[in-house]
Each structure stands twice: as C-alpha cells, then as structure tokens.
Amino acid sequence: MAARSQRRQGPPMMPVLHPRASACAKIILFGEHAVVHGQPALAAALPDALRLEAERLDDPRAPLTLDIPAWSLSLSLVPELEHPVARACADVLAHCDGPLQGWAIRGDASIPAGAGLGSSAALTVALAKLALGPDAAVEEIVEASMVGEQVFHGTPSGIDSQVAARGGVLRFVRGAAPVQVALPRPVTLLVVPSGHARSTAAEVAKVHLALERWPTLARPMIEVLGRTTELGERALLEGDVARLGQLADIAHGVLAGLGVSSPILDELCGVARAAGAAGAKLTGAGGGGCMLAWPAGDPTALVAAFDARGLSPLVVEVGR
Ligand code: PMV
C-alpha cells in the first residue's frame, strides 16, 4: 500500500510499467480444497514459470495489449471486452494505479494455462510486479494479485498468489502469514498435466455442496486433508518419500470422496502407482488439470509410462 499512496501524492504522472517481471507457478503438495475451509496446505513454487515484458506503444492512448503465445492468449484491454482475463488484468492494473493504455505486454510461459498449476496467479502477480516495480513489498503484490484472482475464481484462499509471489515451499493457512518451509535437500516429484480443462470455481463449489449435504461426513474429510498437510510437511522435511506417497494416496481418496477427482485423474494415479510411484494424487482444484506422483526412486520408468500415453510429465525438484 505504501508505494501506491506515495504515488498518489504530488503532481499527477502518466502511469508506467517496468520493463520486465516474472512469477512462479505452484504445485499444491497437500491441502487443496481443505485450505478454503481453514485447514493448512503445503505448496511448492516452480520458479519463473511466467516472464512478462512491457514495451511502450507509439500511441499512448491505444488500449494496452497482452500476448502470451504459449497460452494462445492475445487481447487488448478495450473497455467493452467481456473476457475474464482482460477484466482480471484491468482490475489488477487499476488497483496498482498502472496504465490501461499505451503499453504492449508479452509473456513467455513454461507451464500450461488452466491446469491447476497457478497460471492465473502467476499472471496477476507478474502484472502487479510490472506495475509496482522491483521494490514493491510482497504483501502489496499479493494483494493486487488477489484482485485479479477474485475475477477468475470467486473467493480463492490466496495460496496460489502467495506462492506465485514468494516462491519456495510454503505452509499456508487462510488469513494468516504464510510460513516458508526450508527443506534440508530437494525432493523430486512428477507432475502430469491431464490435458482436461476444468474450472476451479466449479470444483470449489462441489466441496461447498458436500459440506452442506453431508456436514458430518464432509467436515471430518476436510480435517483429514489438513492432517495430511501436517504429516506431509514432516515427511518432506525428513525426505521420507514412502510416507509422502502413502499420504498422497490417502489425500487423493478423500478428494475423490468429496467429488473433485475425475476418471482421467483416477486413471493417471493408477498409471503412476503401477509404474512404481510411492503414491499419487490430484493437485490443485481437480476435475481435470494435473496429477502429482512421488517417484519411489529414479523417475525414469515413471516418466516413460506417461510418455507412452502421449502425456508430457514434468520432473520437478521441490525445495531447490
Ligand atoms: O485453481 P487451482 O487448480 O490452482 O487450485 C486452487 C486450490 C483450491 O484449494 C482448490 C482453491 C483455493 O482457493 O485454494
């Protein structure tokens, strides 16, 4: 807030963007959905998953443009455009007192969009950084990102924005300051995009419905998910992959019971386990999106099992 209120004092100036900014993507290791209902979640960052560059347009009154070829995204911030990405971007820039005209932004992304890896948070965080500059406080960046995330997802817990802005491995409880978890050594995991699109808001609504219909069942299930986060953090700190795998299997079963898995995610978890993974679960909102698996050792056989199905697994080192 400090930087914004300072800019508001003094003579009016043309808002500008900084030349470049980047943001992390995220993998939720444990606690997705439960985090919406007050339980802890654990997430790891994929550094520099989105890089944005801003350039002045010759015409300072031309609408701001945003192009991210990897996401097939190309739009201009014309007021009449009813596109959620345009609305979210305009809201983030307006929140940061940034320009809505006279600039072209181009992005380079190393993760797919809409796959549960936090692409929207990466976009809104990187945009906020372009507008607020390199010295902005991380809290200010997260606050601006949340303005856009609300356009995309309704009432998100904020975990995606926190990881996109801060990086590292974070333990997060809604409404509290996130805690960085320092791992003694990196741990390898596999993330497999299913290629099936889904809506975070729709999956979050399914859990709300389960809580309304079956409160005495769904509430303890949410608490079990919170417990997998706590035990998962301990296992991660100890590098105990066997336990991480078992906890992932438990978490996936509970998430499936709450209705947020899907045939493809169940199938991918089965493929991972059959190829020797210590365990597997959906990651993110579910419904489609991505699966994560903890390899029991060398991940080569696991990668080959997904390659053979024409999927593109990502081997990720958490905590590097
Ligand atoms: O939108 P995704 O797939 O990155 O998942 C968001 C995580 C949820 O816990 C499902 C929702 C939230 O707001 O935390």
Image (tube, helix red, strand yellow):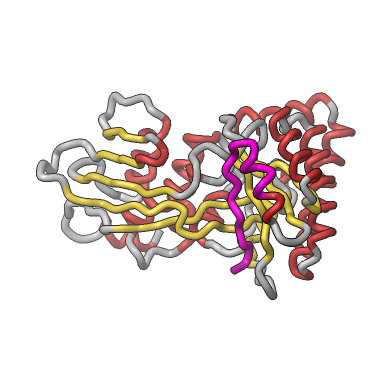
The residue furthest left is 58
Q: Does residue 217 appear left or right of residue 279 in this picture? A: right
Residue at the image point whose x is 52% and y is 52% from the top:
25
Quarter of the image where one finds residue 178: bottom right
Q: What's the magenta region?
A: 303-320
- For the question of whether residue 4 can be seen, the reply is no
- For the question of whether residue 149 can be seen, the reply is yes
- Looking at the figure, which quarter contains the C terminus? bottom right
Q: Nearer the viewer, residue 312 or 9?
A: 312
Q: Does residue 122 appear left or right of residue 59 in this picture? A: right
Q: Position of residue 285 (x, y in %)?
A: 64, 38
Confirm whether the magenta stretch covers residue 309: yes
Q: Nearer the viewer, residue 107 or 5?
A: 107
Confirm whether the magenta stretch covers residue 237: no
Q: Position of residue 241 (x, y in %)?
A: 79, 61
The residue furthest bottom is 184
Residue at the image point whose x is 14% and y is 39% from the top:
61
243 up-or-down from 118: above or below? below
Residue at the image point whose x is 50% and y is 60% from the top:
47
- Looking at the figure, which quarter contains the N terminus? bottom left
Q: Does residue 112 appear left or right of residue 232 in this picture? A: left
Q: Position of residue 65 (x, y in %)?
A: 26, 39
